[in-house]
Image: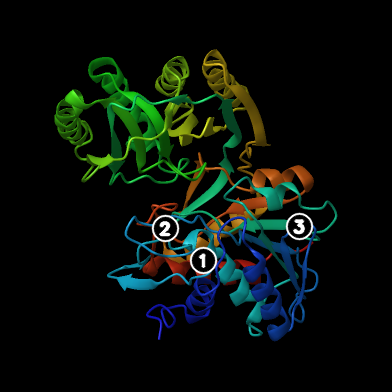
Amino acid sequence: MSEIKNLNPECIWRNFDALTQVPRPSGHLEKVQHMLLEFAVRVGVEAFLDPAGNIVMRKPASPGMENRKSIILQAHMDMVPQKSNESTHNFETDPIQTYVDGEWVKAKGTTLGADNGIGVAAIMAVMEDKTLVHGPVEGLITADEETGMFGANDLPEGELNGDILLNLDSETWGKFVIGSAGGVDVTATLEYKEVETDKDDAALKVVIKGLKGGHSGLEINEGRGNANKLMARFVHEAIAEYGARLATWHGGNMRNAIPFECETVLTLPKENVEALKEAVAEWCALFNNEYRTIEENIQFFTEDVEVPATEVPEEIQDNLLDAIYGCHNGVLRMIPVFPSVVETSSNLAIIDIDGGHAYFKLLARSSRESMRDYIATTLESTFSMAGMKVEMSGEYGGWDPNTDSEILQLLEKNYRELFNEDAIEQVDHAGLECSVILGKYPHLDVVSLGPTMRSPHTTTERCLISTVAPFWELLKKTMAEAPVK
């Protein structure tokens, strides 16, 4: 039996455990959609799948609570599919293997999916519990948040009836998020004609791994290594000093995750192979020294491989490398009036160079629209100079804080009464669906909250067990005291 199934509160952990048994990587949500609709039938609440792939559940008010404002509980059903090199996990078919490690719930070799499975489990717990006291409640479980907020972006207007939105996708207990950054995806592509390699050359695969990676919104300010950026530094030297040529490059796999591994295949004169291998060892020591106290064990090594038939033309190779080197990655600036919070950043998330096609994917974020446009244009200019085609997509606005929020004041009062301390109001650099939903339902009073999670979007994702029970207590008390219409 699952270790997590009977943790406290049982109603949330049992439902989260059920979610871990259903594959739900972004882009492959049919199974979890079916599971959620079946759940709604079983517990006797109204539910439907909307045209955007979102699940909407509705539960009527408890007797005597019909005059209360309606609360929408919102979370997203998809999870980021990351796994360790040693894992054979198939995210489209296999359940997540969870376990308890001290104070934390973790997964074996993969992302845990507590982002945002705990939020979905809380909605399920509300929908099935007939003893709760509450006004009208809707559950909005959105599709494909992690790959572009597609469910929220395509949410039909007029579908929701609520007055208050509680987003359950925040990741630090005791902090109420009242604002978040906007963002835009930047995609740069280039088609090129490969050239034949020198048959007298040798070839090496160069691999960097062992980096922490992480959430490109929540952890972009921690100074973690970006595998694509680190690889660029070495490849630049390999070309200049050892006559290397680039054949392929594969780094990163999620637009909103800091890339934690990258591999390239380089060709070079046979007489330079040993010198290049020695250089790799030196760079490995350098990277570990540069990132000491931030990264724990950066691995940088080579493998002998067969010489590929083709490689990137020299001019194209140099232009692409210049673009990788030159594009901004990481924090651009902090919010001037909240200097501890990141305002603007970008993440060089994915690079694929292979078979005559180069593909770069970045996510630019900012809580200020003018700065979001600035960083996006900076990236566009960098890649355009390399001859690449640049497209912007998935744009979403920031969520402006409302410190006069009625639901915020109620949450803060209840938090103080339950836990004898004050909660913290926070603006997040991570993008939340709140801004998109507010664009369609501007009347909503919105706050985001959740239990503590760390390292989402990585194989070290974990949920702090002790924060789930107070999260549930606060949610129940706040629903029971929902404002009168």
- If you read the primary sequence from the N terminus, does the residue marked by circle 1 or circle 3 appear first? 1
Q: Quadrant of the N terminus?
A: bottom left
Front residue (pair 54, 136): 54
Residue matched to label 1: 118
For label 1, count other residues whose C-alpha is less than 10 Å away and answer few (under 14), some (14-19) or many (20+): many
The kind of residue tagged 3 is Asp
Residue 350 appears left or right of 31:
left
Q: Quadrant of the C terminus?
A: bottom right
For the question of whether residue 326 can be seen, the reply is yes
> What color scheme is it?
rainbow
Front residue (pair 315, 140): 315
Which mark's residue is nearer the viewer, 1 or 3? 1
Q: Is residue 225 above or below residue 165?
A: above
Q: Position of residue 398 (x, y in %)?
A: 63, 36
The kind of residue tagged 2 is Met
Residue matched to label 2: 453
How far is disc 2 from disc 1 in space, using C-alphas?
10 Å
The kind of residue tagged 1 is Ile
Q: Is residue 396 above or below residue 109?
A: above
For label 2, count other residues whose C-alpha is less than 10 Å away and answer few (under 14), some (14-19) or many (20+): many
- If you read the primary sequence from the N terminus, does the residue marked by circle 2 or circle 1 appear first? 1
Circles 3 and 2: CB distance less than 8 Å? no
How far is disc 3 from disc 2 in space, using C-alphas?
28 Å
Front residue (pair 305, 185): 305
Residue 106 appears left or right of 447:
left
Residue matched to label 3: 163
Q: Position of residue 481 (x, y in %)?
A: 65, 68
Q: Which mark is residue 48?
A: none
Secondary element at tag 1 = helix
Circles 2 and 1: CB distance less than 8 Å? yes
For label 3, count other residues whose C-alpha is less than 10 Å away and answer few (under 14), some (14-19) or many (20+): many
